[in-house]
Amino acid sequence: MYQEKVVLCGANAYNQKFYINEDFDSLPQAIKDELKIMCVLYVQDIGGILTLEYDEEGNLCFRTDAESDDFGYDEIGSVLKIRQIQRTKTELLEALEMYYRVFFMQGGDHES
C-alpha cells in the first residue's frame, strides 16, 4: 500500500511552479492540463501553495499553505475558492479518486 498521503499535484505562487507527481504520468494529457489550470489559477487568485493529496482511504484532499510573512494570502478566499472548485469540478475529482483507488491502492475497498 502507498504511504499515508500521496501528492497528486500542486502549484506554488512563490516560485511560480506547477508540479505533477510522475507516478501519475499515465493520466490523459487533458486531465493533467485541467489540473494544471485549476491549481495555477488558484495560486494566482489566492496566493500561497496548493497541493492535491490522496489520503490513506484514497480521498482527494486540498491542502493549502502560506509563508508566515505573506500578507497577500487570502485565507477566507482560499476556503471559498476550494469550495467552488469542489462544486464545479465534482466529476473530475471523483474520477481522480476512482482512478487512484483502482490503480494505486493495493487491497483497497474497491471491487471488480
Image (cartoon, grey):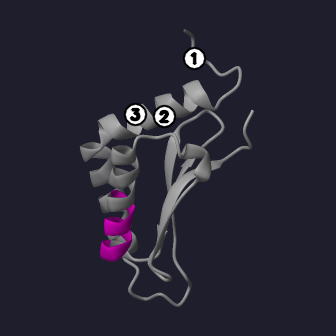
- Report whether residue 51 is seen: no
Tell whether 109 sits left or right of 13: right
Label 1 crowd bin: few (<14), some (14–19), many (20+), radius 10 Å = few
Residue placed most toward the observer, 50 or 28: 28
Which comes sooner in the sequence, label 1 or label 3?
3
Residue placed most toward the observer, 28 or 65: 28
Identify the residue at the far left of this view: 88
Query: On the image, numbered disc 1 is attached to which residue?
Result: 110
Look at 50% across and 43% down and name the residue there.
Answer: 60
Query: On the image, numbered disc 3 is attached to which residue?
Result: 94
Residue 38, image x, y percentages: 33, 58
Q: Amino acid at mark 2?
A: Glu
Chain part drawn in magenta: 38-45
What label does residue 56 carry, if any?
none
- Helix, strand or loop at mark 3: helix
Q: Quadrant of the C terminus?
A: top right
Label 2 crowd bin: few (<14), some (14–19), many (20+), radius 10 Å = some
Marks 3,2: beta carbons within 8 A = yes
- Report whether residue 84 is seen: yes
The span from disc 1 to disc 3 (Cα, nearest Å) is 14 Å
Query: On the image, numbered disc 2 is attached to which residue?
Result: 97
The span from disc 3 to disc 2 (Cα, nearest Å) is 5 Å
Dominant SS type (magenta): helix
**Residue 32 versus residue 65 in the image, above or below:** above
Queried whether the magenta region covers residue 52, the answer comes back as: no
Q: Amino acid at mark 1?
A: His
- Helix, strand or loop at mark 1: loop
Q: Amino acid at mark 3?
A: Glu
